[in-house]
Amino acid sequence: MWTGVQWTGTIGPNQTQRWFTWGWPANEHVVWYLMPRTPRPGAPELDWDVAVERANAAHCTYWITVKNLTGGSVDFEGRFAVLG
Amino acid sequence: MGISFQRARELFDLVNSKVCCPSSANAPCIPFLYPDDGCWGRAHEMCRLIMAAGDLPRKIWIQGNLRVASSNQPTCLVQWSWHVAPTLQVSTWSGDQPYVIDPALFQEPVPQHVWAGIQGDPAPTLTPTGPEIFHLFYAPDTYDPTYAKTNTVLNTYRNELKLRAASGDGPPPYFSCMSRGRGVQWFGMLEPNATRRWFTWGWPASWHVFWTVMPVTPCPGGPQLAWRVAAERASASDCTYWVTVTNLTGDRVKFEGRYNVLN
């Protein structure tokens, strides 16, 4: 398994926004998750959903929808882990 | 002087990005997923795209008793008496070599001898031509400078692909032609905009298991599948996972249900 940060982003208060990342080998098992970089203790800051598109027989595109659960802007890292 | 393999790959990716979604197959997509027939239309359209990108393709025509394994045909086999695809001259350590651009058979440019070698005839007849030859074996269609005949051929096989995708076999690829790879628990298919739940039982509850899904039916342009996972503790030692998969598109989608054990 190996991990990485694919992108960094900022999302406004109570906003929902979608990012995509393309050209991933479809045979790799990849999971996506987020980590806020803006400390805001007391409650969850971000939620996310993942969807996937098969672009061709060899490659796929991941679509990550991020939701800011707070009333302030949140900086975050879009992280991945290649599981195998 | 030949182009680099990297440039050949870029051009391969350019034409492959036009692959048809099987169930909708809207023009101007190229029906690579219907390998049975129509190669001359696909080849002419690929040459048009490559020339529009500033490169100079040729074509290679192959004749023989051709038999190619394909997971995009319900019988897992396509048989032809001839076939055609574009070529590009690629610089290699041993000089320029023709590489074939044929997304119906390969996922990258391949040397011409590799392309010919998988087609099942040990002594095929190979005929290289310029890109302007639309049909080598039917004189009335030798040329198609306006691409009108090309569009007719592409439209015919887009429709064949749609018909097959709507049939009981569903869209390609066909599971009977595929083996489950490592970490693939099941193959599934979802109807347009459908949500369905699968379960898989008897997993050691001490294992840390992640579940993902991966479409196997190509359809570029937007997300196809989303999923949710729930878990049931069936006993002190075992659990059952419930995976709910949603088809976000108006097309049928086949997919793999995948797992990874993290510990």
Image: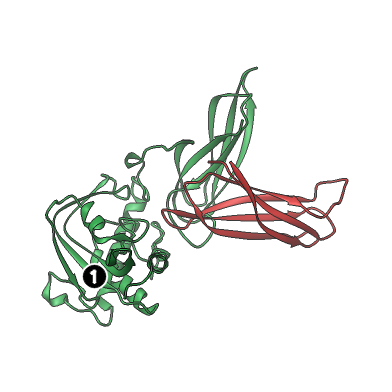
Chain colours: A red, B green
Quadrant housing residue B129: bottom left
Q: Chain of mark 1?
A: B
Residue B36 appears in view = no
Q: Residue placed farthest to the right in the image?
A: A42
Q: Residue at x 75, y 60 (%)?
A: A15
> Residue B131's spot in the image, x, y percent?
25, 76
Residue B208 appears in view = yes
Please, what secondary structure does the residue beneath circle 1 have?
A: strand
Instruction: Please determine whether, in this image, residue A78 is positioned above or below residue B144.
Output: above
Q: Residue placed farthest to the bottom in the image?
A: B146
Instruction: Please determine whether, in this image, residue B128 is positioned above or below residue B262.
Output: below
Choose between A14 and A62: the one closer to the eye. Answer: A62
Q: Is residue B163 left or right of residue B7?
A: left
> Residue B24's spot in the image, x, y percent?
41, 60
**Number of disc labels:** 1
Q: Which residue is mark 1?
A: B59
> Residue A48's spot in the image, x, y percent?
69, 50
Q: Residue at x 37, y 59 (%)?
A: B108
Near mark 1 (Cα within 10 A), the count class, few <14, some 14-19 or many ≥20, is many
Quadrant housing residue B211: top right
Tell me the quadrant of the picture where the N terminus of chain A can be found. top right
Q: Is residue B104 left or right of residue B199?
A: left
Choose between B125 and A9: the one closer to the eye. Answer: B125
